[in-house]
Image (cartoon, rainbow, N blue to C red):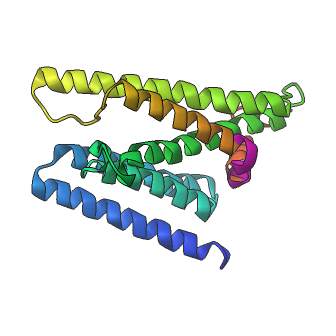
Amino acid sequence: MTDDGRPFAVAARFGQLLLVALVGYGALAGRLTVVTNGLLALALTGVPAVVDWYYAHETDPRLLLWIVLAALLHVAGFLGAYSVQTGLLSWYDQVAHMVSAALVAGVGYAILVALDRRSRRNRFPGSFRFVFTVALVMAVGVSWEILEFGAGTVAGLLGADEVLVQYGTDDIVFDLTFNTLAGVLVAVWGTGYFTGLTSLFRRHWPGSGNS
């Protein structure tokens, strides 16, 4: 790791410690939603380390921090920020969605470019990459909203705490709008953060040796 990347790596580790603290708080306070989402978020932030170990790869520290930040914003929102209806914090949910959606967009873009470069038979022009990235974010966003609705319905039927919470039609519209905006921003300006991931996919994609 270069010295330039070390501050991002340190910040990412600090974010993971905050996630551990949130899980501990959730357990002590009996908040199942915080505990469940916190454990899932911690598992997600550990994926780059597993990938780095298995493939002898080094994840860009900026990307690692992005993953941790998305996870941290999601879990911290269940402390109350998600339900705020007025003031600056009323946009917390949308900002959290935007950060996560941008990450999804970048991963999708990296996969597409890896497919493009691994074989002469696959050629995706820039316009297609843009449309694919935005469409992927929209599809994942809609799937997430359906998951939130389903989780809320099941929790209501069982009389349990909601692991995922949905706050009405307006919330869905705003979430999807910000998801789409995140996809556009990544497709236009943010693809450079995922070049390492593209190289990883390209090297280890099944059949990548047959170009």
Residue at the far front in the pictured view:
87
| Residue 121 screen position, x and y as percent | 87, 25
Counting from the top left corner in percent of width and height, residue 149 is at: 31, 23
Above/below status of 120 relative to 10: above
Q: Is residue 196 magenta?
A: no
Furthest-right residue in view?
120
Question: Which quadrant is the N terminus positioned in?
Answer: bottom right
Task: State yes or no: residue 191 in magenta.
Answer: yes
Position of residue 11 measured from the top left corner of the image (x, y, whole percent): 48, 70
For image coordinates 47% across by 47% down, the residue present is 95
Q: Which residue is the extreme one toward the bottom?
A: 3
- Evaluate whether residue 42 shows in this view: no
At a point 45% along the width and 24% down the height, the residue shown is: 143
Q: Nearer the viewer, residue 54 or 130?
A: 130
Whole-percent x, y for residue 8 in the image? 56, 69
Q: Up-down: is 149 above or below 130?
A: above
* Left-right relation of 79 to 64: left
Q: Residue at x 45, y 54 (%)?
A: 45
Predominant secondary structure in magenta? helix
**Residue 163 image-quadrant placement:** top left
Highlighted magenta segment, given as a residue range: 187-195
